[in-house]
Amino acid sequence: MTQTKDKLIEITDLKKYFAVKGSGLLARRQYVQAVESVSFAIYRGETLGLVGESGCGKSTLGRAIIRLHEPTSGRIVYDGTTIYDSDARIAVPMLPYRRKMQIIFQDPSASLDPRMTVGEIVGEALDIHKICSGKAQRRERINQLLDQVGLNTEHANRFPHEFSGGQQQRVGIARALAVNPEFIVCDEPISALDVSIQSQVVNMLEDLQQEMGLTYLFIAHDISVVRHISNRIGVMYLGNLVELSESYELCNHPIHPYTQTLLSAVPLPDPEKNKTRQRILLEGDIPSPIHPPEGCRFHTRCPYATEKCRRETPAFREYGPGHFAACHMLEAKG
Ligand code: SF4
């Protein structure tokens, strides 16, 4: 995984709210604030891991970046071209960018149409983007893609239910690769798989990245999975990005209290150290994203919260080279 500092994607103040019905007779419409003012860049050729508890907005953020969910506001620049800007009212047609940006979904069985053969599923994207001229070239490309993900050419005539979960995910990956993308959102691609085959899929994604020069946004709830595949890691809490840094730096010197909590739950390889190390336990439940807390969204569970944390939203600042976090306690330390 070679990391260059060439920005492929830059998002600024990205928000995604979902309207939901309130309860009661005269109920007003309410909004789930799934992603709140998130800004960061993804460099060409890197894997950026995104972690956080279920419901923290990481999948929504991934889908908003490729505009599978239309953002509520903010700005997205892809390879120097603004593809979304709520202020300038820019929302460019996405079809050319669908070829460049793809997604691998969490649940392969739910994301594959059970009425289509594997050949039809993989070939559909080739047809939409008019990639092959003629049936022979199309068949050849489908066979090539199946081979790339470790499946056989005879698998093209079978239906998704005839495959194991791991094989179904390989079909999902072949479908994403069909259009020769540059950037792939890997949305919890191994969470639904047996532990025994998770590493096979991760290794395959790494090999494909090397071969094709791919850039990944790798989303997972388990930081121990993300740290092995990612060049950098971003940590989300209740719709906010709270920390972002190089993987080694973030895992060994976390500076945000929430990241410290996540890492304290990761088992250590040394059983003796595991016994003696202190695990940080958070009080209470994650608040509702419909009524998120004022100020720092983590203040209701943070052991260091002060009055200022309850009032003011901390800025996302750089505290070391490429090491960003949002916390008043860090601001005070300078
Ligand atoms: Fe905790 Fe305050 Fe920092 Fe938020 S800003 S993480 S509440 S210390």
Image (spheres, rainbow, N blue to C red):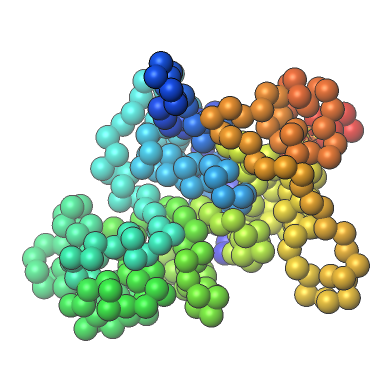
Q: Which of 14 and 106 is in front in this view?
A: 106
Determine whether 186 is above or below 36 in the image.
below
Residue drawn at 53 percent across, 80 percent down? 196
Residue at 32% x, 59% y is: 111
Quadrant position of ligand 1: top right
* 163 displayed left or right of 80: left
- Position above or below: 190 against 25: below
Residue 296 % position (x, y): 71, 29
Q: Residue lying furthest front in this view? A: 25
Quarter of the figure that contains the C terminus: top right
Seen at 37% across and 64% down, the residue is 108
- In this rendering, the count of numbered labels is 0
Residue 318 in percent (x, y) is at 74, 36
Q: In this view, does 191 lie above or below 203?
A: above
**161 or 263: which is nearer to us?**
161
Could you say which quadrant of the image residue 237 lies in? top right
